[in-house]
Amino acid sequence: MYASVAARLLANAEALNMVESVGNVARHRRVPIIVPREEGYSLIYAPSVSGECLANAYQRHIVELAGIEKLPVCESCKKGFFIKHGVLEAIRDVAQDWEKPLVEKKIKNPEEVEKLILENCIVEDICGFLLPEEIPAKRTSKFKVSFMVPTFDAVEQLALESQFHVRYAPDPELHRIYYVEIGSVLYALQMSLEVDEIGRPTMLAKEQVLEKGDRLKRIEVAVKAMASMLENRIFGARLSRINPISEVRSILVAVSTPLPFTVTPPHGREYMKTTAARADAFKKLINGEEIKLFAYDNEKAAEGIAGIQKCDTISSLFSEVLSYIKEKT
């Protein structure tokens, strides 16, 4: 089972991903965007928010929800240091009992390494890890996320502007001026979740490590973390003083089984119509393929489209998604 999510997020006065300081200027991250035109394509360098930034926030939401549900999280992830056992020296002095065989390099079998970490840390179960030792062990993330980039239908309306600030001090000679570059953009965002892979090792021929009830709890946390992230929009940098005035304009979720099906990138409001048409065609092509579409729509993108279950809020959307996943798992 595979869950694909696409969202359109309007963010005004945001500095969610700062990448460098040159002198007293903190610049916003930019990426090159290829925008299709009626004739040919245009290249635009536009504000963006990196997938690493979003994944960090997603993992923090997992940690919070795992604490509520009493699910295992390693000490490093609890503190927000998502090094994922990739640097064993960093945890040598604080290793828990279950981690000591890893730190002391007593386990040489990559399959056993994955199984041990999977059982003891839900973050690394869902979001993967890489242990680069003599015999390397890894688990590919079951959660995938794009950069947030401007939508094609609003790329001409984006803006970046440097804002002047002063750090005040009693002595005028100690005043410090600095500039923070902020943007206002309608962003496109895509995420996905390999639901069936949660709680199951990838190097042991899908051997069942967790009981079904434990797997369902982890799947529930994985879905709720996406819901919390989009519902509350707590992610990115500089939220203490430049918390953007933001609004999710629309979200479309596709849950598919047995093959993955991805939502059309949300660069225009027609992405819901295009996704519904693609879903129908894909189900006809693949025998036994099931695709269920759920939408939160604050910009009338889903009006008149059959086959999409519409929800009034972001939380109710993911509640319906989770109910459907549990029914099919």
Image (cartoon, rainbow, N blue to C red):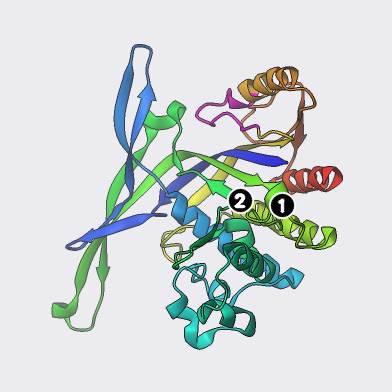
Q: Position of residue 306 (x, y in %)?
A: 76, 21
**Any part of residue 150 in sight:** yes
Residue, far left: 173
User: Taking the image as drawn, is residue 61 in sight?
Assistant: no
Residue 56's place in the image compared with 43, above or below, is below
Magenta highlight range: 261-272
For the N terminus, the image quarter is top right
Dot placed on the residue nearer the N-terminal end, 1 or 2: 2
Pointer 2: what residue? 142
Q: Position of residue 289 (x, y in %)?
A: 76, 28
215 within the magenta span: no
Reading the image, the residue beneath label 1 is: 206
Whether residue 268 appears in magenta in the rendering, the answer is yes
Looking at the rendered structure, the secondary structure element under dot 1 is loop
Q: Residue at x 63, y 57 (%)?
A: 126
Q: CA distance from mark 1 to mark 2?
A: 14 Å
Residue at the outermost bottom position: 93
| Quadrant housing residue 160 | top left
Say which residue appears at 67% left-offset and 71% top-offset.
120
Specify whether 169 is left or right of 127: left
Residue 328 locus on image (x, y percent): 83, 42
- Eye-nearest disc, 1 or 2: 1
Residue 296 horizontal side relative to residue 165, left or right: right
Q: Residue furthest top?
A: 39
